[in-house]
Structure formats: C-alpha cells, structure tokens
Image (cartoon, coloured by chain):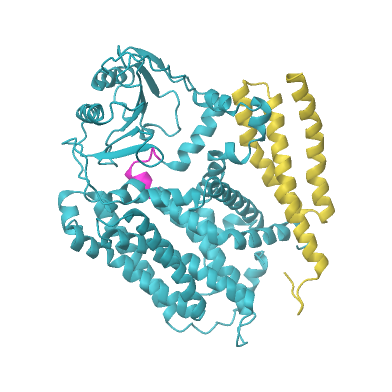
Amino acid sequence: MKRTAAGPPLSYRLAVISRSLAALLGGYLLASMVSICVALLAPMPQVDATLTGLLLSFVFYLLAFIWCFACRSAWRAWLGVLLPSLVLAIVNGLAYWMKNP
Amino acid sequence: MKEGFRQAMAWLHTWTGLIFGWLLFAIFLSGTLSYFKEEISHWAQPELRSHALDPLASLGLAQGYLEANAGHSASWMIRLPSEREAALSVGWRDPEGGRRGFVRKSLDAQSGQPVEARDSRGGDFFYRFHFELQMPYPWGRWLSTFCAFIMLLGLVTGIITHKKIFKEFFTFRPGKGQRSWLDGHNAIGVLVLPFHLMISYSSLVLFMYMVMPAGILASYGGNTNGYFNDLFGRDEVPKVANVATPLVPLERLYAKVQEQVPGARIGFIQVQNPGDLNARVTFTQSAADHVAYKRSASWTFDGATGALLNQGAPESAAMMTSFSFAGLHMGNYAGPWLRWLYFVFGVAGTAVIGTGLVMWLGKRQLKHAKSERIPGELRLVEVLNIASMSGLLLAVAAFFWANRLLPVGLEGRANWEINSFFLLWALSLLHAALRPGRRAWGEQLGLGALAFALLPLLNALTTGQGLDHSVAVGDWAMAGFDLTALGTGAFLAWAAAKMLRPPKPVAKRAPRASKASVEAVEVK
C-alpha cells in the first residue's frame, strides 16, 4: 500500500470498509442462499441435499470474498453479491412455497 | 487495493493474514498439540498405569463398578482402554453430582478400582482451546470457524499471488534476511499445501451446522433435530418400564459384535435404562478403525435379553464426503507414524502463519531502519507478534510446569494449571511491551528454551518417570513427550541465540538477486 504522510485518503478507507462488509455480510447471504437452494432443489434425499448445500456454501463464500476485493469498485462488490442473492432468494421462495403450501 | 487481480489478491492475503494471523497461530499450535491429546494427558496424569489390553476383562470390571456405584442412573458410558489411553473410563448421568450432571471416573484397567490421579485437563485443554478459544459457547466455535475460513481464503489468495508456485518452491535463498523469510514461507506453504487445504476446509465441515444453519432451517423448518436424526440415524430410546431386570453381561454382547466385524476395536459403550426391562446397550466401533466417521459401525442390543436390535444405517455418498473430511481433520485413524506426520504438518502450518507475520513487519520496518523510533502501529504489531508466538510457547510450558509443581491436593487444581497458562501469556505481552523488539524475542525464546529443555528433568524429579524409566519400560508416550520437549528446547535455544546476537548488517542486493525479485510478485 502506498502511504503519504497523512496515510491513504478517507474515501479509500471507506471503500475498503464497504468492500469488507460486502464480503463478510453479502458473501454470507449469498452462501446461505446457495445452501438453501441446493437443500430444496437438489434431486436427492432430504438429508443429502441439505448436507450437499452446506458443503458447497463455503465455496461460494470464498468466491464472494475474492470478488469483493478483486472488482473495480465497492459498488460493484455489493452488486456482485446482492444481485445473485436476490435471484436465489426468489427461486428459494418459490421452491419453499411449493414444498410448504 | 491495487490494480490488477493478482495485486488485489496479494493485498487481501496480506491484510487478512495480519488481522487473523495471531489467533490462527494459537489455533494451529493448539491443534497440532491435540494430535497427541491422549499422550499429553498420559504425561499430565502419570498416576494412570497402562496394562496389556484385555477388552473382555475391562468390560466386566466396568459393568461391576457401574452396577455397584451407579445402579440408579438413567445412562452409563464406558470407554475401553486403547493403545493410546491407559484408563478404563466410566461415566454416568447423575443430576446431583459431577460437572454438568455427569460423573466421570478413571478406573485402573487391571484392578477396576478408581485411580486417584492429579486433577488436570491434560491434552484436553489444548484440544478444547483449539476450537473454543476459552470463550463461552457458542462464540469460541464461531470465531475459530471463521478463522478457519480466513485460513482457506489465505491459501487460495496465496496460490493466486504466487503464480509460479512450483518454480518458486525450488528457490531458497538463505541468509538473505527478508528474502529468506519469503522463500521459507512459500516453500513450507507449498510443500504441505494439500494438508493445509484439507485441514482448513474440514474445520468448516465440522461446524457447518452451526455457522451456516440456513439450509437446515429451510429444509427441516424448526425441527433441526430431524436433520441430526437423519444424519446420524439415532433411534428413540424406550421409556423406563420400571420392571427391574438384570443387565446381560456386556462380554456376551461384545462377542456378538466380534461375530459381525471380526477384530473390531470398540470405542465406547452406552447403556440406557440399566437394570430395567427396557435397557438398551450400544457398542460403537473405535474411530481408530476407519478414516471416516461411520454411523454404520454401531450396534444396539436389548439389554435384558441380549438380542441384537439393529445396526447403524449405511452412509450415503454425501455423508461419506463430509464424514471423511471430519475424520481426516481429527486423524483418529492415524497410527504412530502417520500421527507424527500430522504433527509435523501442523508445525509447518504454524510456521507458515508465523513467517507471514514476521515478514509483514520486517518489510515495513525496513523503511524505518534509519530513523530512531518506528511508528506506533508497527510497534503494536511487533509486540503482538512476540506475545502471540514466543509468549504462547511460554504459556504452554507454564501449563506443563504447573502440572508438575502445583500440590496434588490444591482446590481447583486443574483450573490453576489453565490460569498459569493465561497468566504467563499475559506476562509475556507485558514483557514484550516493555522491552525493545529484538531483546524481547531473544529473552522470551531463551526462557522458553530453558522451560522446555528442563521439563524432562522436572518430570524425572517429581514423578520418578523420567526418560531413564520410560525408555527402560517402553512407555513411549511418556518418553516421546520428554524427547519432544527437549527438541523444542533445542530449537528455541537456536532461535534465541540468533535473536540475542547483534543483527548482521543488511547485505547490498546483488544485481542478479534483484532481477529474480522482479519476476516474483511480492506480497505487499
């Protein structure tokens, strides 16, 4: 990190905090949505589908973390985790409603 | 944040590594010690004598003891002695006694009488600290699992950063200061990479039901017990019939298990409603018998008639995947050689984290080499580095010294051992804050060298089971502990000597070396 006498500017610091929160919270939301989606939709017995969803969720958490720090701006970081979460939430909502009418 | 993908990943690697490095170092070190949990416990309770294994005799002794002392209890637990555990452990539920309503006793495997061993948590302390961090439930488990995730992230970002990973593996430039640390960090990291990836992902698997509950909640609704029943295949235990019926001899049931799986080692035995018409006895095969956890390797008998009621259900592919990760992480299946390999890999993991922390600071200190004082934040990192690494080693030594020196009759003795651990850790932080960096390193490592190197002597003087005795009778767990302490002492003495000598003047970089460093993306 380049440092001037006063350190990096405030806007840079805020952007880093914003990305960190996107990774931590947004990434967790995405991982949870993936685990629900697999648990409800995978064509397996209930316990296996749930287990597979749990096992896969961390891969998506990891990808979300990488995305949040690799993309060009903090806004894209949030967009990148929230948009897929929203899509999955709709799918999950439908699937849940079909199973528990 | 930097431009470019690899630069961004290097940034992420550096800063997550710094923030979580201190805690990860402690988690890795205590986890490494946990691979020798039973051996450490054996050292910590030298009063427990090991005898030749005789499962049938042990079962008879345990049943006799429990019938005489816990006939009123609703459930019993028996753990048979094994190659690694000398004691025959029994326990029973008793709402009025014991810790959390559960009484435990260690019996001598030959006489069947309780052994009055010194009160100590032994290896169990390090094992619990590894994933609970001495914090109240469930915070410690959450925090340590998150640290495991950061470790996995650190590995993946590290791989991305070091694109030429295999080429760099063969690059080691000793005696070059900062460059040598980076080479060491990379070499150890790459050499044990499969182990590191396995160990950090599997720790997520172990507690995934806790940290990622959304899938379970969505699929099972509020009935999370349903998930665990499906996963572990638990049966309902019938209610007490209140008809007194003697329990069948457990040896007979043991023989029936041996008919099913010849040569099976039995881990533990649970008896529910003992002495009742509706008694149930469950034998579970030892985790040492297979890599993965196996729910199928358990047999439930009717305790009144001795009939085999059912065997655990077979595992599906998804279950085998997650149970294998759990088994690989804990390494219960490992024999002595593989167990040592686990230990060495654990030490390597600890070293990767330690070298990373040292490098972060070293790189930034170089810029301030000419000025009198280093900036406050760098000094903070330096103090935390010292306390979290050499200070932790001192704390571990303090635990073992307390084990040998605290009087056996002391009230709350086991807790005082743990207090000694944390007291010395706190003192090392104070010491690191008061002394200049290099001196603090040298002094703490030097004290640690003495503390570990003298442990075998202390053991010999206080218990009479020093190396002369343990090697002669072939007590390799005891001897192995003492020898490892000696080795640790020697290593710390070497490190302390390096730190206490005045630093070598920084060598001018040869033009060739600088060319090489341009090729390698450095972690900034």
Residue B340 in magenta? yes
Residue that appears at 62% across and 35% down = A54
Along the line of sight, the residue nearer the viewer: A78 or B425: B425
Residue B155 visible from this viewpoint: yes
Classify residue B249 as left or right of residue B488: left
Residue B21, x across and y down, in percent: 56, 60
> In the figure, what tint was chain A given?
yellow
Residue B95 locus on image (x, y percent)? 38, 34
Please indicate whether residue B426 sits to the left or right of residue B19 in the image.
Answer: left
The chain assigned the colour cyan in the figure is B
Q: Is residue B301 magenta?
A: no
Prevalent SS, magenta region = helix
In the figure, A40 relative to B45: above or below? above
Please state which of residues B272 and B500 is positioned toward the viewer in this rendering.
B272
Q: Which range of residues does the magenta coloring cover? A: B332-341
The residue depicted at 77 percent of the width and 18 percent of the height is A101
Measured from the top left, where is residue B197 in percent x and y? Answer: 55, 47
* Quadrant (top left, top right, bottom left, bottom right) of the N terminus of chain B: bottom right
